[in-house]
Amino acid sequence: MFLEGGDIINFDGTSGESIYGTHFEDEKFELSHSSEGLLSMVNEGCPNSNSSQFIITISAVTHLDNTNVVFGKVLKGMGVLLEVCEVQTVKDVPVKKIHIIDCGELKHDKNWGMEENDDTEDVFTPWPEDWDYSKNIERLNYRYIMDVIKRIKNSGNCYFSRKNYVDAGRKYKKGLRYYKWMITTVDVSESSNESILNIKATLLLNLAAVKLKQKSYREALKLCSEVLQIDKKNSKALFRRSQAYMGLNEYDLGLADLKQASLESPNNKDILLEIDKVKRIISSYLVIEKASYQKMFK
């Protein structure tokens, strides 16, 4: 699998233009397409037909060995490419717009500017793999990373309070990336498991709240269900999943989740009000449905 770019003529992968003329010659085929993050030339299926097109490997593509020239490697930001690769495509065209807002050459001694700089608590790189943590701590431990995750979460909360749901969602997803990275990178003591699972559940629930605001109900439902796999009695997850069900017109399922949430959090006014609201919606729906059937059989 790979990402393709560099068509500066038709912008669809069918052409290209070299600064050296129409085409330029192949270099040595010494390097194999054996891993992710390798840059390789695109040619026209015959020797010495390189132009401006290139690929970045997302996985090993060794079938390109001896035909395409590997000329570089991604040093930072591989996570961005992996996320781009997940965007749905139709006939190789991304369904969502992907914007490259800047490009150019970075000198050897220049700051790459990968850290967040948005006047919030989050001053960390979007992907933990790019994080130069040695600037702040000699040896990583889960307590330090947990503090980093909380600061990223707080940054998301700041955006959510401003109704900037795009950046809020971006921060919560970032927090989940750091969480996943932490689990696989450092030793976590058994006594800390509960607090670690709690931060994961909080990030998932916050992201679900974003998806509800964006009317992405199926995504919100999936996120809440993931929380309930961690804690099946989580009333907040049940409440938000019920809202997702309501957005999908699954009224009975929404009401069932609310009733379960009420059992876990008795006398919660928000839950009780929502139950009453859903019952009224179901009653109205049944009246409309009954009238519709009566018209059909007149």
Image: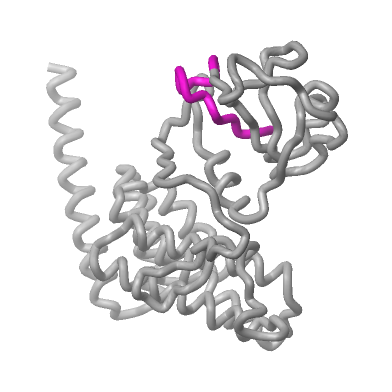
> Based on the displayed image, in which of its 4 quarters is residue 205 positioned?
bottom left
Give 62 or 40, whichever is nearer the viewer.
40
- The residue at the far right in this view is 30
- The residue at the far front in this view is 20
Please tell me which residue is depicted at 57% across the width and 39% down the height of the picture: 85
Q: Is residue 288 left or right of residue 230?
A: left
Q: Is residue 146 left or right of residue 165?
A: right
Q: Main secondary structure of the magenta part?
A: loop
Please tell me which residue is depicted at 15% across the width and 40% down the height of the picture: 287
- The answer to whether any part of residue 228 appears in the image is no
The x and y percentages for residue 252 are 34, 49
The x and y percentages for residue 275 are 26, 63
The x and y percentages for residue 95 are 43, 31
The x and y percentages for residue 60 are 78, 37
Please tell me which residue is depicted at 60% across the width and 45% down the height of the picture: 82
Q: Is residue 297 left or right of residue 88?
A: left
- Reply above or below: 110 against 73: below
User: What range of the chain is rendered magenta?
Assistant: 1-15
What quarter of the picture does the C terminus occupy? top left
